[in-house]
Image (spheres, rainbow, N blue to C red):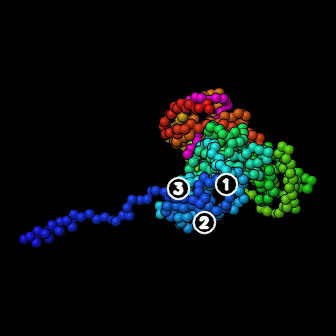
Amino acid sequence: MRVLILIILSVLFASCAKRGTITGGVKDSIPPIMKMSEPKNLSTEFKGNKIKLYFDEYIKLKDINKQLIISPPMKNMPLILPSTPTKILTITLNDTLTPNTTYSLNFGQSIQDNNEGNPYQQFKYIFSTGTYIDSLQLVGQIKDAYAKKTDNFVSVMLYERNEKFYDSIVYKEVPRYITNTLDSLKTFTLENIKAGEYLLVAMKDYNNNNKFDPKKDKIAFHSEIVTIPDNAAYELELFKEELPFKPIRPSQASGNRIILGHEGKSNDVKIELKNGDEIVPTVVTPFENKDSLQIWFKPIKADSLSIKVKKNVLEKEFKLKFNTQKADSLRINAVQSGVLHLGEKYTLKSSIPITKIDASKIKLTNKDSVAVVFTTQYDEPKQLVVIDFKKEPLERYKLTLEKGAFTDLLERESDSLAFTIGTKNLTDYGNLRLHLEGIKSFPIIVELTNAKGDIQASAYSEGETTIDFNLLQPALFTVRIVYDDNKNRVWDTGSYLEKRQTEEVRYFPTEIDVRANWDVDQTLKFSSE
């Protein structure tokens, strides 16, 4: 009987036992620690070219080329070995060091433990070729002058104002001191600086050469020379300069079109096309989404053409070998497909400039086949035909184009076409009324942007502080205001050489939720600072 009880108890315990997996214990979350270095950190009168760092565990290097910031910059990057997991890093300096200078090697988050990848945050190795370590610092923050989101990996630089200083130094020389916001910070601290006068600059440096390339880089600068020591916190606003207009050698695209690439803005450009001594009539339009102009003309017989480009004081002439090619075909497409929102105008896009619109060959009807009154307007730069009419909710429209409704530059008539489009109900849209407070000057541009920063609606105010945006498609909107100082109705960027900052932009920090069939009344208080 006693044996039977023991057997039963054994079975019960076995059936009640829980299954599980063997774990490796608590996950390691402790970053590596440097135990010692040769020479020691914060050494003075540094004379060698090798540094050894000893760590308490095996470490690995991640993104060292992006994360390592050396200040002052070295012309040749040091050699850091090994690239495999190790407890000892050897740094070989490949530059001649400047006398009486404090150097800082900031490793960012590149040093990580080998097992879990815990980073040794912002580890710095500092040494001086002089008798003391410079200990002054300068702090601040980075923001974009126009966009809400700020770039990462922004370099912040100080150029010493001495007998070698000149205005265009940022294009040709590396800075005296440098730091970087890396991939997570929008604030910066420039440390181990000596007392003196400096130009303070920030760059989104796409070439990673510590020099300003206006074709690619963004720049920010403090308008006045900074004197160190300084307890102020500086705000630097990054902007992309507008390049001066520069035409690029043209190319033939078809029998009736030449493409002229360019840098900078092409507004107010004058182009003269000549076949020998004969001036060829042209129409010039921007190439959508490209820094190019399209030069349209009727097909001609020629071996070569000359193209004279003028803007302000710039004048340049190109010679283009001309080949016999097919002419561009005429195509008419609807910009809106399926749904025409109540706040929009119906638009057709032509593949080639239109020279004539015959409204008698255009018919617009509703779902009951009743004619709808409309007007037409042609936007030549964009090659758009705008059909404007009073739109009704929950309606279907049919636009019929007879042959010859449009005539293009080559005197060809458009084919017969038909398009259908529908509208939504008024309850599918929301309305937004904004009451603006704290506006320090007028005029202003008021913009509603989406999460990507794309403009969804805009208004211009020369003094009115109540702004209405009606028939909005439901979304979360961010409100941006631009102080339009020169009253040209667009945001203007800055110029480093002209020491001109951008036009001021302010964001309301909280998104506004506009839902279908809602009327939103919102007061926005903007800081005057």
Residue marked by disc 3:
120
Q: Eyeballing the image, is 272 above or below 56?
A: above
Residue 388 vs residue 515: left or right? right
Amino acid type of disc 2? Leu
Amino acid type of disc 1? Glu
Q: CA distance from mark 2 to mark 1?
A: 24 Å
Of callouts 2 and 3, the N-terminal one: 2
**Residue 449 on the magenta span:** yes
Q: Position of residue 239 (x, y in %)?
A: 68, 45
Amino acid type of disc 3? Tyr
Q: CA distance from mark 2 to mark 3?
A: 17 Å
Question: Which span is picked out in magenta?
Answer: 435-453
Residue marked by disc 2:
81
Tag 2 near tag 1, CB within 8 Å? no
Q: Quadrant of residue 526?
A: top right
Q: Nearer the viewer, residue 197 or 18?
A: 197
